[in-house]
Amino acid sequence: MKVAIVTGAAKPDSIGHEVALRLLKEGMRVVVADLYEEGFAALKQCFCVRCDVSDPSSVEEMIGKAVKHFGRLDVLVNCVGGSWGITRRDLIAAPPLGFRGLTNCSLEEWSTIVAANLDSVFYVCRAAAPHLKKQGGAIVNVASIAARKGIPPGSEGSSGPYAVAKAGVMGLTRQLALELGEFGVRVNCVAPGVIASGRLKRVLQITKQDHGPEGSLKAIPMGRVGTVEECAALIVALCTDDTSYMTGVTVDVNGASYAA
Amino acid sequence: MPLEGLKGRKALVTGAASGIGAAIVDRLRREAVEVIATDIHPGYAMTVADLTDADDVEKLSAKVGTPDFLVNVAGGPVAPSREQTQPALPRGSLKLEEVDETQWSRVIAANLTTAFLVCREFAPRMKARKFGRIVNFASIAARRGSDRVGVHYAAAKGGIIGLTKTLALELGPHGITVNAIAPGFIRTPRIAAAGWGNATDAFIQALPLKRAGKPDDIAGVVAMLCSEAGGYVSGATIDVNGGWYFAP
């Protein structure tokens, strides 16, 4: 039986949560790695491990527990992220008010946001790689449309450092695709636009109702935001043999908002 | 788990007689999709049509009705004709000065005009239903350029990417997604017959996944785009090339 780790899957209204449930339906055993322990009780079918993915020792410990518990690792989905950090408070709070670009963010904001969104993916992939290489498998990372378009000045609910970190995730995906290909490990990425997750709800608490962090929701050509289910289905497809010849690819899922 | 959203839908697959198109037909049928297969090359249960000819496209549309999925595979580096429906692929590289105006026009027609005519024919019906999935075929030749297939084919496939992005904007408000797949080196029977498969062992070993692609590798991505997983993906060109080339 294949074993998957999904980071950032404990919150019930998140993309990661839906990915974890769908990987279970695919017949995989699923490890959920998250700081949001309040969500663990509702994920009894999963092996839940508290993990701060921006801390390399916490990541090493989580991967060790997962492999010890299930004996192998086939799939890794890196869903943890956040445009305003992933501290305990950030897990449930609305984002801070005001535009945070690169020229007006604090150094602490830069470090926190890059740690949460880019360092975290590096740490988890590096710790998971030796186990994935044993029999092959798949990694899926989650970038963002912010990496494609940037965050326009005046926008709230996201940040410049987030856009930069997510662009880094795309580069990391390509580099790992080169390094892990010969071991049968495929590495791909999705770049979601506006998705109706809990994060969007919290962003909309502080913005005008028709404004997401990357601009007006009315400007989306498909005329709607994406669903968590659609985004999770795409991520799961990138974990399966349907995408057996794809590696190093970023798939944009944004309702035609941006065509790379 | 079968992919959600495929069972009971209707698909039109062009260029369906061999290779990638045939694999897509098989895959969608396995997912319980009703498939109408069309090609200029006759075959079992194949609706024969020359899709560079607007009259043929109109005749096809009378037979097809309204498809949920439109998969435009028809094309190739050598344009077929009604007389020669499956021309051999060139064994060597085609240089700029070897492409005459007739070849240029015919390859553009076979790869780009076909997709335009078929989209123009079926998109209004999809709009009326507020649902549709269109999958076009670009190529790695449009992403990185090509040192083999000729400038006409690469240009036509680049045109497919522009057509795809534009239709994604235009048809998005009507619930229709439009995407392209850009295959890398896929070892189809016709490509193997041209000797491309044998000449490239060193090339294959240099690919991150260390193998040539199979038609089924592409069919899986088509199924994904037509399924629930493709519901919010539109305007994208998806590279399926084993890591050969990383487009933006």
Image (tube, helix red, strand yellow):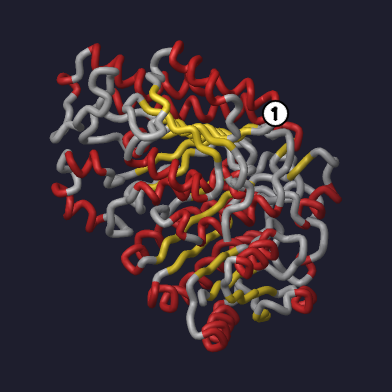
Rendered view: A46 above or below B55: below
| Residue marked by disc 1 | B129
Work out whether residue A95 or residue B58 is closer to the camera in this orientation and state it.
Answer: B58
Would you say B5 lies left or right of A157 here?
A: left
Residue B93 image offset from top left, x and y in percent: 16, 33
The answer to which image quadrant residue B65 occupies is: top right
The answer to which image quadrant residue B247 occupies is: top left
Residue A111 seen in the figure = no
Residue B53 image offset from top left, x and y in percent: 40, 13
Rendered view: A16 above or below B64: below
Answer few, some or many: residues within 10 Å of disc 1's Cα (few below 14, many 20 plus, some between 14 and 19).
some
Rendered view: B199 above or below B121: below
The answer to which image quadrant residue B105 occupies is: top left
Residue B61 image offset from top left, x and y in percent: 53, 20
Residue at far front of view: B44
Q: Residue at x 23, y 22 (%)?
A: B84
Residue A154 image offset from top left, x and y in percent: 74, 40
Residue B247 seen in the figure = yes
Q: Residue at x 44, y 78 (%)?
A: A131
Work out whether residue B76 or residue B101 is closer to the camera in this orientation and state it.
Answer: B76
Work out whether residue A47 or residue B51 is closer to the camera in this orientation and state it.
Answer: B51
Q: Residue at x 56, y 82 (%)?
A: A66
In the structure shown, which secondary structural element does the residue marked by tag 1 occupy?
A: helix
| Amino acid carrying mark 1 in the image | Arg
